[in-house]
Image (spheres, helix red, strand yellow):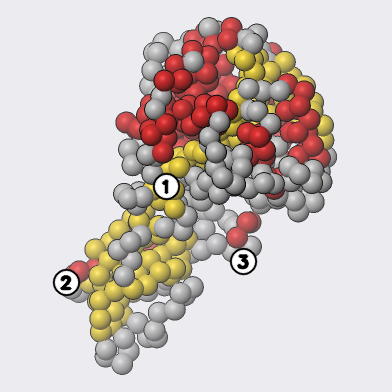
Amino acid sequence: MVMQCKSSNIWDSYNNFFESELVKRRFSYDEFLPVMRRHKTRFAERIEGLSSAGHSIYSYTIGSGKTTVLLWSQMHGNEPVSTLALLDVMNYLETVTALPLLKSLTVCALPMLNPFGNDKFCRRNAMGIDLNRDVLALSAPESRILKKLHGDIAPSFGFNLHDQEQYYTTLPDRKQTMISFLAPKYNAEGDVNDIRKASMQLIASAADYIRPYADGCIGKYSDSFMPNAFGDNMMLWGTSTILVECGASGDDIDRKLPRKAAAVAIIKMLKSIASKDYSDTDLSLYNDIPNNIRDNTFDLIITGINIQMPSGRSFRADVGIRRYKGGDIEDFADYSSVYRVEGFGDLSQFGGIKFFNGAEASLLLNKEIKIGDTADYTILLNNGTQMSINQLY
Ligand SMILES: [Zn+2]
């Protein structure tokens, strides 16, 4: 089916290519498979091999252009928003609007490289391997599939699609990061050759494009050189590689807005690759994208509340609370509503997804606060009203 994109503005026309069959962040491989395979009518479908748990891994190729682009998603199983954004991009590539693009580009998509991890909601594959640290050892079949496909098609551009935790913020604004990008290093020195420069310029132009919709929420991912990661090596092999990390946005548990930002940014970059309009972009626009800092925010910060100890002692402090994660951080239930204290004292250097001003309230304690405590507190407002932590969300 050829869909129409009436508006030339990618952001505003998103509903025309948004994959509405998959809306929730959590979905199974079985739910995903028919949605992905629908694309075989417009794309050339190929089975690239079997995952470590026996799932078929498919690629989808469209376009007749000289410049080849490879997009792959979800090497880390608990990062499914990247796959949803890729499905949106694949839908876009089937629209009439994309026809000129496909005269310049040949686009190959490899969605969901780690179906086992998707279904278990864990980072690693069925062998316990982190696929994005396996480019040298190639011990996992999924890694070999990606390496072989890269060798087969020798893409000029590569998009490595991931999700990041919700507790990143940008600096200096300390806003929760909705999306982050990186042009990975190809050596420890961080040299910039023409291959990496193109990635930086594309990112800068995409960040500029989505900034009106994500102001202060666009970050640059940590750029330490990782010799065993795919992105860094693809850059070394001559592919201008772009890391996209779908972040989070407040209460948006299904990450619809980060997904949209990622899909729109990727499409903008594909258009720039086709038109080569990025080549004049000043590298300072890339370097000026704020750093993306991990563990720099809380689900809720209660600021300056009067802490009332059982001894009668009282003082004012900030309390930082996060949703509970199970013992295995890689397999947590993301929809948990159990909250824990994860920060206490002066939290003015952290971002908060929500804030509660504690100036007119007290926290009545029967023991001292320890990091990791369940936040089952009662808050007494100065007007006599009592509230539980859950009521502050
Ligand atoms: Zn990842």
The label nearer to you, 2 versus 3, is 3
Q: Is residue 233 above or below residue 62?
A: below
Q: Which residue is mark 2?
A: 383
Instruction: Tell me the number on the disc at residue 203.
Output: none
Mark 3 / mark 1, whichever is N-terminal: 1
Q: Are marks 3 and 1 in contact (CB under 8 Å)?
A: no
Instruction: Tell me the number on the disc at residue 327.
Output: 3
Q: Is residue 69 above or below residue 297?
A: above
The amino acid sitting under disc 1 is Asn
Disc 1/disc 2 C-alpha distance (Å): 42 Å
**Ligand 1 is within 8 Å of the C-beta of the residue at disc 1:** no
Q: Is residue 71 above or below residue 220?
A: above
Q: Which residue is mark 1?
A: 291
Q: Give the SS element for disc 1.
A: loop
The amino acid sitting under disc 2 is Asn
Q: Say left or right for 246 vs 171.
A: right
Q: Pinpoint residue 236: horizontal percent, then vertical percent.
A: 66, 34
Mark 2 / mark 3, whichever is N-terminal: 3
Image point (53%, 7%), residue name: 100
Image point (49%, 73%), residue name: 372
Q: Residues within 10 Å of mark 3 (few under 14, many from 20)?
A: few
Q: Nearer the viewer, residue 126 or 279?
A: 279
Image point (79%, 43%), residue name: 138
Q: Give the SS element for disc 2.
A: loop
Disc 2/disc 3 C-alpha distance (Å): 39 Å
Q: Give the SS element for disc 3.
A: loop
The amino acid sitting under disc 3 is Gly
